[in-house]
């Protein structure tokens, strides 16, 4: 009751805290902007999940050994590159603030530092995963299941060697969202996952499940190349 009386007194004697009908009007411009970003983000997540499902279906076709190895290795994989995903989120906030302020010089300086830090961290994590792949797999897989262990170790050492690729991709996602170009994030997702799925089916038919593991970093690197070229082109236009 005391809190209600406090709010009531503030509303009566402090005009700046009063809520009127004009404050409750819908700003359709803001609604359109929010909807635009939300729809593209939803599309990006849908594409990602669809691609993951297609890869999972292909993995399942190789039998229970590969399925078990993939399930365990993906858990390790996701945890390993979680920090660089957070780097991308922090970088996105940094770019958005400076983009709004029109300080493109600070964005350029911060971008260099972000890519250096993310790459250095990713390389360190890759080295650890490569060196301790067996021990990491033993967290989820019994030591007697040697076939599953070997398949999981191959996955971690092939795909884990390229964590710098996913680290770069997270930064690019953050950059394009921050400069109000979320459609480019969708394009990069389509390139990354589209390449992954296509190559996974092509390579696995020739070299087995290793082809699936190889397809993942190839997709990252192609998306990185596309994103970096687009970023450099947009920055050149800003300088002009």
Image (cartoon, rainbow, N blue to C red):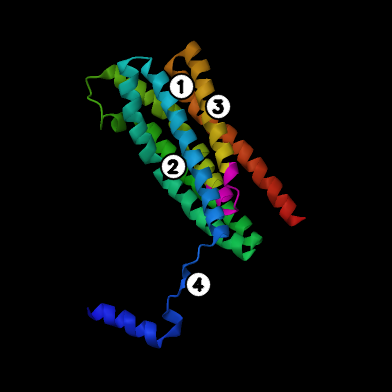
**Neighbourhood count class around disc 2 (C-alpha, 10 Å): few under 14, some 14–19, many 20 upward:** some
Disc 4 or disc 1, which is closer to the eye? 4
Disc 3 or disc 2, which is closer to the eye? 3
Q: Secondary structure at mark 2?
A: helix
Which numbered disc covers residue 212? 1
Q: Residue at x 33, y 85 (%)?
A: 9
Q: Which quadrant is home to the N terminus?
A: bottom left
The disc, 3 or 2, on the residue closer to the chain's N-terminal end is 2
Q: Circle 3 sits on which residue? A: 195
How far is disc 3 from disc 2 in space, using C-alphas?
Answer: 26 Å
How far is disc 4 from disc 1 in space, using C-alphas?
Answer: 57 Å
The disc, 3 or 1, on the residue closer to the chain's N-terminal end is 3
As drawn, 119 above or below 110:
above
Disc 4 or disc 2, which is closer to the eye? 4
Disc 3 or disc 4, which is closer to the eye? 4
Q: How many numbered callouts?
A: 4
How far is disc 3 from disc 4 in space, using C-alphas?
Answer: 51 Å
Residue range (magenta): 174-184
Disc 3 or disc 1, which is closer to the eye? 3
The disc, 4 or 2, on the residue closer to the chain's N-terminal end is 4
Which numbered disc covers residue 73? none
Inspect this view and state whether residue 119 appears: no
Q: Circle 4 sits on which residue? A: 22
């Amino acid at each position: 009751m005391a809190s209600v009386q406090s709010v009531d007194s503030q509303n009566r004697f402090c005009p700046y805290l009063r809520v009127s009908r004009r404050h409750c009007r819908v700003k359709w411009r803001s609604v359109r902007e929010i909807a635009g970003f939300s729809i593209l983000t939803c599309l990006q997540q849908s594409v990602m999940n669809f691609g993951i499902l297609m890869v999972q279906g292909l993995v399942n076709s190789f039998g229970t050994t590969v399925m078990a190895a993939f399930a365990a290795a993906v858990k390790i994989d996701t945890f390993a590159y979680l920090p660089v995903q957070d780097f991308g989120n922090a970088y996105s906030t940094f770019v958005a603030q400076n983009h709004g302020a029109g300080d493109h010089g600070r964005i350029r300086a911060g971008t260099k530092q972000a890519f250096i830090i993310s790459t250095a961290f990713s390389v360190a994590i890759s080295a650890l995963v490569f060196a301790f792949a067996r021990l990491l797999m033993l967290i989820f897989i019994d030591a007697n299941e040697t076939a599953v262990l070997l398949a999981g170790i191959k996955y971690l050492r092939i795909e884990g060697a390229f964590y710098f690729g996913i680290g770069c991709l997270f930064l690019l996602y953050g950059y394009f969202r921050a400069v109000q170009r979320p459609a480019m994030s969708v394009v990069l997702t389509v390139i990354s996952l589209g390449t992954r799925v296509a190559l996974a089916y092509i390579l696995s038919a020739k070299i087995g499940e290793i082809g699936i593991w190889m397809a993942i970093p190839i997709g990252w690197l192609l998306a990185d190349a596309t994103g970096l070229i687009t970023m450099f082109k947009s920055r050149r236009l800003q300088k002009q």
